[in-house]
Image (tube, grey):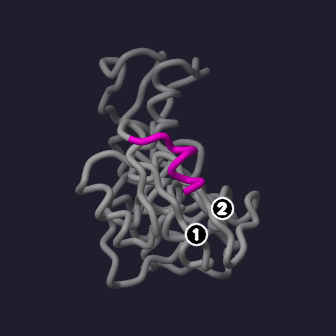
Amino acid sequence: MKAAVYDNPGPPTVLKYAEVPDPVCGPQDVLIAVEAISIEGGDLINRRSTQQRSRWIVGYAAAGTIVAVGDEVRDRTVGDRVAAFDMQGSHAESWAVPAARTWLVPDRLGMAEAAVLPISFGTAYHCVTTKGRLQEGETVLIQAAAGGVGLAAVQLARGAGANVIAVARESVRQARLSGLGASHVIDRLENDVVEESDG
């Protein structure tokens, strides 16, 4: 199969589109025919700085259709549309990933949209809910709210019934954040975030 790979870290020029062995579907894995990928910050950091012991297939996140299921998997079947997350291998034609790291994609959602959800919403959920323990009626300040994780955090916080203060530049982004539930949006270059938040 074809995949995006690199052998040594460095600038984007180290990336290659190469033929690699097909992945093996382990007993707790599913094999996904990849239809869309997500390029995450970790992908860029790894490519610039992480020395690999062997050829590295790039990618943390993707979405596609399951084409094979491991012997121990009970909650996924061939033909399921899923989004997935793992530490490498998503930027390829096929991807073997633990079934526990997949989420079913509803028919109304496109694969390109689904591919970006595991990292952005997973990270935001961990911050807002797992670690932040945000409760209804509390106020939360979300920095860099117009980015992928920020947009997810705004929606999760609003869904939890919190008062959401978002920090972002540009009127289009600010309008989007208001539409997603931010009760107040602050432009950090034009206003003091602490003063605006206290107000």
Around disc 2, counting alpha carbons within 10 Å, would you say few (fewer than 14), some (14 to 19), or many (20 or more)? many
* 196 within the magenta span: yes
* Front one among 75 and 172: 172
Q: Quadrant of the N terminus?
A: top left
- Residue at 34% from the left image edge and 35% from the top image edge: 19
Task: Provide residue 30's location: percent of width, then percent of height.
Answer: 56, 65
Q: Residue 130 — which label?
A: none
Region of the chain picked out in magenta, as a range: 191-199
Q: Return the disc, 1 or 2, that comes first in the chain's sequence.
A: 2
Name the spot of residue 87 as percent of width and height, x first.
59, 44
Looking at this view, is 109 or 189 the one in front? 189
Which residue position is annotated with label 2?
128
Find disc 1 in the rendering and name its residue.
157
Quadrant of the rendered structure where residue 91 is? top left
Residue drawn where x is 64% and y is 81% of the image: 75
User: Quadrant of residue 190 in the image?
Assistant: top left
- State the residue at coordinates (46%, 42%): 59
Give the quadrant of the C terminus. bottom right
Three-letter residue code for mark 2: Val
Q: Could you say where residue 41 lies in the image, as x and y percent from the top left? A: 47, 37
The answer to whether residue 83 is left or right of residue 112 is: right
